[in-house]
């Protein structure tokens, strides 16, 4: 079992304990109304050349990027947008299966609303890494750069129907059937199949961070995940891959300075 799955139980405890509402006050909250449900968005500053959009992992709302002020630090220089996918935080949810294709479509709607014609820099953690990868492949002309934070990958994100059922039932019992994490967990097997069929990333600057420290209860091999992340360089001429032995899956909590440092490296490569 990969550390992505082994850490799911700890993940929900971590999210509830680490939120600090006082750190959200500098962001402007607004609601993006879709045809069937609404997404809560939080933006900071508005005068930069690029829009930076953060995509959270399974089980996390937007505040995971504020736990150690990663979003605020990047927002000091750039127009930053963090948001809650359907079923998280103040975002509502519809009956559509919450697979990667649907999550990418809704990310496209978020970008369309807030980018105002600018290219975007996407930052994605865990399952969010799959979402931004799909977005970049489907919308190459809209991407300035990509920062992957310990992203999930189909080569290691493999599970049986029995395992998915156990995960789904556990999250459903804790958070209910309309929680975003519950609904997204039900699509994990399909997500692996979907990602396997995708072509390479577009040729834009890409930075990938891999947490090499095993999380509590993890039985996965971090080297396998590192090797999977290496595959993201196929077709990319400007690719930086950092292995961080001081971080587990949640690099934004274990080593937030690394994310900020490598984000600055990424934007230094942009015109």
Image (tube, rainbow, N blue to C red):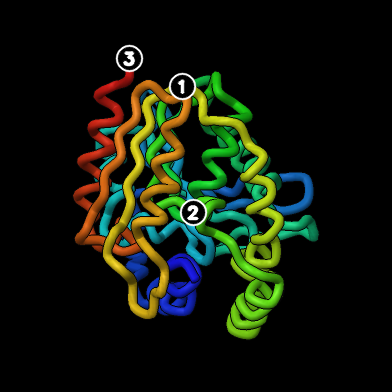
Residue under label 3: 271
Regarding residue 181, the answer to whether it shows in the image is yes
Relative to 150, is 264 on the left or the right? Answer: left
Please provide percent x and percent y for residue 75: 31, 40
Q: Is residue 103 above or below residue 61?
A: above
- Which residue is labeled 1 in the image? 203
Identify residue for label 2.
152
Cα distance between the residues tagged 1 and 2: 20 Å
Q: Which label number is shown at residue 174? A: none
Q: Is residue 52 left or right of residue 271?
A: right
User: Which image quadrant for residue 90?
Assistant: bottom right
Residue 216: where, in percent of width, then height? Answer: 34, 78
* Number of numbered discs overlaid on the protein picture: 3
* x 19%, y 50%: residue: 257
Q: Please rate how many residues cluster around mark 3, counting C-alpha atoms within 10 Å: few if below 14, some from 14 to 19, many from 20.
A: few
State the residue at coordinates (38%, 80%).
217
Comparing 254 with 110, the one in front is: 254
Earlier residue among tags 1 and 3: 1
Up-down relation of residue 93 to residue 46 (above or below): below
CA separation, marks 1 and 3?
A: 14 Å
Label 3 element class: loop
Label 2 packing within 10 angstroms: few (<14), some (14-19), many (20+) = many
Q: Secondary structure at mark 2?
A: loop
* Discs 1/3, front: 1
Q: Residue at x 54, y 30 (%)?
A: 200
Earlier residue among tags 1 and 2: 2
Mark nearer the viewer, 3 or 2: 2
Residue 28 seen anywhere in this rendered image of the structure: no
Disc 1 vs disc 3: Cβ atoms closer than 8 Å?
no
Query: Is residue 8 depicted above or below 63 in this figure?
Result: below
Q: CA distance from mark 3 to mark 2?
A: 29 Å
């Amino acid at each position: 079992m990969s550390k992505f799955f082994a850490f799911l139980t700890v993940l929900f405890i971590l999210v509830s304990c680490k939120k600090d509402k006082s750190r959200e006050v500098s962001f402007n909250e607004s609601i993006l109304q879709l045809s069937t449900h609404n997404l809560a968005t939080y933006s900071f500053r508005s005068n930069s050349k690029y829009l930076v959009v953060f995509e959270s992992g399974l089980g996390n709302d937007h505040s995971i990027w504020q736990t150690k002020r990663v979003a605020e630090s990047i927002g000091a220089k750039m127009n930053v947008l963090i948001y809650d996918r359907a079923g998280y935080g103040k975002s509502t949810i519809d009956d559509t299966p919450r697979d990667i294709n649907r999550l990418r479509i809704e990310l496209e709607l978020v970008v369309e609303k807030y980018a105002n014609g600018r290219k975007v820099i996407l930052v994605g953690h865990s399952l969010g890494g799959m979402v931004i990868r799909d977005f970049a492949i489907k919308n190459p002309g809209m991407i300035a750069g990509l920062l992957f934070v310990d992203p999930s990958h189909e080569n290691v994100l493999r599970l049986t129907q029995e395992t998915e059922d156990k995960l789904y039932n556990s999250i459903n019992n804790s958070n209910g059937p309309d929680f975003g994490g519950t609904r997204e967990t039900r699509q994990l097997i399909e997500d692996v199949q979907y990602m396997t069929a995708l072509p390479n990333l577009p040729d834009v600057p890409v930075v990938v961070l891999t947490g090499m420290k095993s999380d509590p209860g993890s039985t996965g091999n971090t080297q396998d995940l590192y090797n999977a992340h290496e595959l993201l360089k196929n077709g990319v001429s400007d690719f930086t891959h950092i292995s961080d032995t001081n971080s587990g899956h949640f690099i934004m909590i274990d080593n937030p300075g690394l994310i900020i440092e490598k984000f600055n490296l990424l934007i230094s490569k942009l015109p």
